[in-house]
Image (cartoon, rainbow, N blue to C red):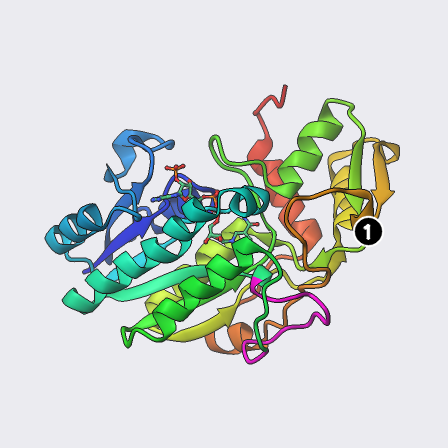
Amino acid sequence: MKRVLVCGSNGLLGQRLAFVLDGEPEYEVLHTSHQRSFVSEQSLFDYTQLDISNRSDVKSLILSYRPDVVLNAAAMTNVDHCERERELAWKVNVTGVEHLVEVCRRINAKLIHVSTDYVFDGKYGNYTEEDRANPVNYYGKTKLAGENVIVSSGIEYAILRTILVYGLGVNVKNNFALWVINNLNDGKQIRCVEDQTSNPTHVHDLAMAMKSVMERDLSGLFHISGPETISRYDFAMKAAEIFGYDKSLIIRIKTSDLEPRAIRPMNTSFLIDKAKKQLHYNPMNITQGLMMMQQDLTGIHLN
Ligand SMILES: NC(=O)c1ccc[n+]([C@@H]2O[C@H](COP(=O)([O-])OP(=O)(O)OC[C@H]3O[C@@H](n4cnc5c(N)ncnc54)[C@H](OP(=O)(O)O)[C@@H]3O)[C@@H](O)[C@H]2O)c1
């Protein structure tokens, strides 16, 4: 039986990992996150608080639990917040990763980590794992620095870069699809950029890819995203269509119409051939992903 430690279990990906790994007889899983308690039904999962930016806590927990694999879904993910709170962003996205690497090395554990399309400058799109990273904002810089810590460490690792993750979770940060659905459900107008394109990724596909990397014991860098490249505006229109909301509430704008604190890369689409080949990764298209979200929402009142 493999012992698995998950970091960031209260986040969108962390919660999905809990359900994907639940009941798998070959894994014993300990879920951890920054907050004291687990947002999901406590009794079903083993959970303990762990702040990855606290070196001594990381050391003592991991040295006593002695996992074979650490799945790191913990990060500071709000792009504008990272731009403002640089010290904190570095502490979680880089120093936190250094702590995990240090202890994984000591017990010979494998680290499976998640990174982002924002390591790219977005000038060309269709990025492969071989393309040169060149982040344009602080979040991207911290995530690339976190990757570099792992790659240069000499430990066993896999890094999964992903894009615009969407799906449902308990008290999760507003992801783009959820923001669109919540606003349209309330009859509110939203402004969506037509000039930022990428491959939205359903959180279930990402969690399954992470599990697959662990099961197949693969190493290295993988691009994990949805199969379709789409602008945020078109993605919102698609969500309105599937959920039956009023499309006229969606206003088409350009990035230059906004004043985001952090610069956004324009086209960060991925090529996912490596993942398809090595993981047999076969992600949902956008219609399927949004329909899965709709099913998950059944019975939940949005207001
Ligand atoms: N969401 C996207 O669109 C997207 C796109 C590209 C890449 N990614 C990457 O995918 C991964 C998962 O993202 P996500 O969408 O699941 O993010 P999320 O919903 O924001 O979850 C991140 C979790 O990390 C935990 N965390 C933050 N600081 C921590 C610390 N110091 N110690 C321990 N836990 C800490 C938080 O836990 P608490 O709630 O307990 O405070 C939070 O629940 C991240 O590496 C992110 O960079 C995400």
Q: Quadrant of the N terminus?
A: bottom left
Q: Quadrant of the C terminus?
A: top right
Residue at coordinates 77% horizontally, 45% vertically from top-left? Answer: 238
Residue 231 appears left or right of 88: right
Residue at coordinates 72% horizontally, 26% vertically from top-left? Answer: 185
Instruction: Locate residue 153, reporting x and y percent.
Output: 30, 73
Instruction: Locate residue 160, reporting x and y percent.
Output: 46, 65
Among all residues in the image, which is located at the extreme top? 303
Residue 68 visible somewhere in the drawing = no
Residue 23 appears left or right of 274: left
129 over 287 or under it: above or below: below
| SS for callout 1 | loop
2 over 61 or under it: above or below: below
Q: Nearer the viewer, residue 284 or 163?
A: 163
Q: Nearer the viewer, residue 52 or 227?
A: 52
Among all residues in the image, which is located at the extreme right? 248
Residue 155 appears left or right of 175: left
Instruction: Locate residue 171, reporting x and y percent.
Output: 48, 30
Among all residues in the image, which is located at the extreme bottom? 130
Amino acid at dot 1: Glu
Boundaries of the magenta span: 119-131
Question: Which residue, given by chain and number where applicable, does mark 1 sit on?
Answer: 194
Q: Nearer the viewer, residue 42 or 61?
A: 61
Would residue 148 be counted in the magenta stretch? no
